[in-house]
Amino acid sequence: ATVNYGASHCSTATAAYSMGDSETHKAAGNAHFKAGDYLKAAAAYTKAIKAAPENHVLYSNRAQAFLKLNKVSKALDDADKCIELDPTFVKGYHRKASALHACGEAAKSEEAAQLLLSVIGSGIDDKELLRLGVQIKGRQFVELVDAQRKKSGEKDADKSNDAETKAGAASGAATKERSDGGERANKEGKGSEAEGAQQAPEVAPKTAEKTAEKVAGAGADKAAAVTAA
């Protein structure tokens, strides 16, 4: 059998090269972005994505570059891809909400606000998301967040109270069952004592009869003895 070590080594080397190549292009994209050259930044991020297509951060970075270039639809596509690759990456939602708001439509802005509320409501406390929400809906967004948190707190309290009620009911049922069992045992014990008390008098007459027979027999024997004498 022929073992091809070269192919495995080659694929590993290619993967390492691709990763290094991706980081190089990403660094170039970051430098272009800081310099305000968003077109070159987007081009560099595109090269980085070709080298590492599963890197969610690259899509987030390119989405931001597209937003600066006012290429909203492309920014939205990249934001969606970023979220698809890593749903826990907060910046992906920031990019998507920004792209929706950049569409310039009231419905899209409302969708963006609802997206931000949903993410914040899931327990993510991010100042950038809150700031973007205020930028979209003004002070009203803060009020919506507060109302959402209050409602969530009430639901948690209701769940806690419901659990305590169920636990109390279960404990009460167990106590009642033990009490009922004790009462049954006491009743059964008293019933046995009563039966014993009713049976006891029946023994006495029989005992008296036997005693009388013995006495009578003894008297007859004595009488016989006297007569014989």
Image (cartoon, helix red, strand yellow):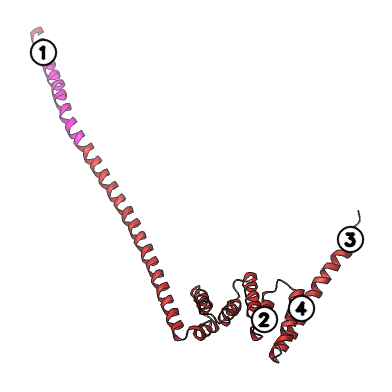
- Residue type highlighted by circle 4: Lys
Which structural element holds mark 1? helix
Q: Is residue 157 above or below residue 106?
A: above
Q: Is residue 139 above or below residue 118?
A: below
Q: Secondary structure at mark 3?
A: loop
Q: Quadrant of the C terminus?
A: top left
Residue designated by label 3: 4
Say if the magenta span includes residue 203: yes
What residue is at 11 percent from the left and 13 percent from the top?
Answer: 220
In 3D space, how far apart are the residues under numbered discs 3 and 4 (Cα atoms)? 31 Å
Q: Which residue is mark 2?
A: 61
Marks 1 and 3, the one that precedes in the sequence: 3
* Separation of marks 1 and 3 at Cα, in angstroms: 126 Å
C-alpha span from label 3 to label 2? 40 Å
Spot the residue most to the top: 228
Neighbourhood count class around disc 1 (C-alpha, 10 Å): few under 14, some 14–19, many 20 upward: few
Residue located at (82% from left, 69% from top): 12
Mark 2 crowdedness (10 Å alpha carbons): few <14, some 14-19, many ≥20:
many
* Residue 33: image location, x then y, percent: 69, 88
> In the displayed structure, does residue 213 sit left or right of residue 56?
left
**Pointer 1 with pointer 4, Cβ within 8 A:** no
Q: Which residue is mark 1?
A: 220
| Magenta part of the chain | 194-223
